[in-house]
Image: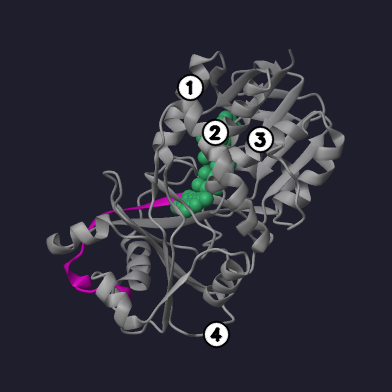
Amino acid sequence: MGDALILGAGIMGLSTAFALHEAGQRVTVVEAGPVPNPLGASVDDHRLIRHAYGDASGYMRMVEAAYPVWEALFDAIGERPYAETGVLALSDGAGAGEGWFGASRRALRGEGHGVEDLSPDRLAARFPWVRPEGVAEAFLAPRGGVLMARRIVAALARHLEGRGVTFRRARVRQADPARARLLLEDGHVLEAAQLVLAAGPWAARMVPGLAGRVTPSRQIVVYLEPPAELREAWARAPMVLDLAADGGFYAVPPVAGTGLKIGDHRFSMAGDPDDPREASATERDAILALALPRLRDAARYRVAEARACYYDVSEGERFVLEPLSPRCAVMSGFSGHGFKFGPLLGRAVAAALGDPVRMAALPGWAAGGAAGWDVAA
Ligand SMILES: Cc1cc2nc3c(=O)[nH]c(=O)nc-3n(C[C@H](O)[C@H](O)[C@H](O)COP(=O)(O)OP(=O)(O)OC[C@H]3O[C@@H](n4cnc5c(N)ncnc54)[C@H](O)[C@@H]3O)c2cc1C
């Protein structure tokens, strides 16, 4: 039996630990914070999974591959913290079909995914919380939903610990990819046959070669309480994506006891993941300004909470899954869209370690290259 060290107990590190453990390896996960770590990119009430991906069709196809791997993980952990909501995409018509909205709709139809166009009138009739003024086009895709991120991370960690994976709470000072070693802040050195570095927004500190390629980005999320008469409709709502090249917003419906959350997909490319996480009034208001024009009775929503999260952004939002040595791989650059792929990427990294042919194919596939690579095999 081989052994492996994993730095980071976010969804990437835990998913890789899961796959390596299933493959019979003895696994140790090293994590500086508690598990789940509320400061990590993986930990909030929810993360979205959806096929709508603009013109990034490699990632759209990867979503199809991700679903069965999620199901296998849910079977293993004995719960299914997932709510299928469908996807409602909105557009103000700018870009005349060339933007994210048009590209997503074309790609979805091209691959045989069901997409229902909604006129602004039908939109308002079906979803009473939408303010249709200013919406030129909308479509509804039935698949896609909300992964209960914190619950998943907690359940997966419990599952792994119960099956003999070792969790070590320690801060890593330095990683040595060539020797698959971690030097801890307390002076201890850990070594294994294989090493995986999955440090989320702290990645560039652990892997100097990532500096300049991957940037931590402070992102604000705002939790809202809808007016009482809209609560029931919101509880049955799809996720809302109103994205454009220069931003837009997303809304996560309040499923399974979670809150209604809004955020944006513009990258601040600023801040340090060790900074305080309280959002300023200016940060909060910038998110509200994007979302409130789309909500009927917007003034009657109450802000329950606004806070900052961090993720690591790479050029073109392309994932960085790369070998650093024959014994070490790094997982980074998830650019605010990695959670949905966690178990799939973990399985891919586990399969590639020790298999030079797979390892050579890993970076291009993970970067969204459409070339099929049957990682699930
Ligand atoms: C606001 C927001 C919204 C998002 N929305 C979505 C979405 O809708 N859909 C989607 O698919 N994805 C989404 N994402 C992205 C997704 O959550 C991330 O891509 C994913 O969680 C990254 O996981 P990770 O394991 O790489 O990082 P993390 O969860 O950050 O895990 C890294 C871990 O490494 C530990 N660590 C770092 N350095 C050290 C060290 N030196 N020593 C020991 N431990 C260390 C950290 O403590 C941390 O726990 C979103 C992210 C954010 C922040």
Q: Nearer the viewer, residue 299 or 142?
A: 142
Q: Are marks 4 and 2 in contact (CB under 8 Å)?
A: no
Q: Secondary structure at mark 3?
A: helix
In the rendered view, does 59 fall on the left or right side of 158?
A: right
Q: Secondary structure at mark 4?
A: loop
195 shown above or below 199: above
Q: Nearer the viewer, residue 79 or 178?
A: 79
Q: Earlier in the sequence, mark 2 or mark 3?
A: 2
Q: Secondary structure at mark 1?
A: helix
Task: Please state, as top left, top right, bottom left or bottom right, where the C terminus lies in the image.
Answer: top right
Q: Which residue is mark 1?
A: 159
Q: Which residue is mark 3?
A: 347
Q: Which of the numbered marks, if any, corresponds to residue 72?
A: 2
Nearer mark to the viewer, of 2 and 1: 2
Amino acid of disc 1? His
Q: Is residue 95 magenta?
A: no
Q: Which of the numbered marks, if any, corresponds to residue 95?
A: 4
Q: Is residue 89 visible?
A: yes
How far separated are the C-alphas under marks 3 and 1?
A: 16 Å
Q: Earlier in the sequence, mark 2 or mark 1?
A: 2
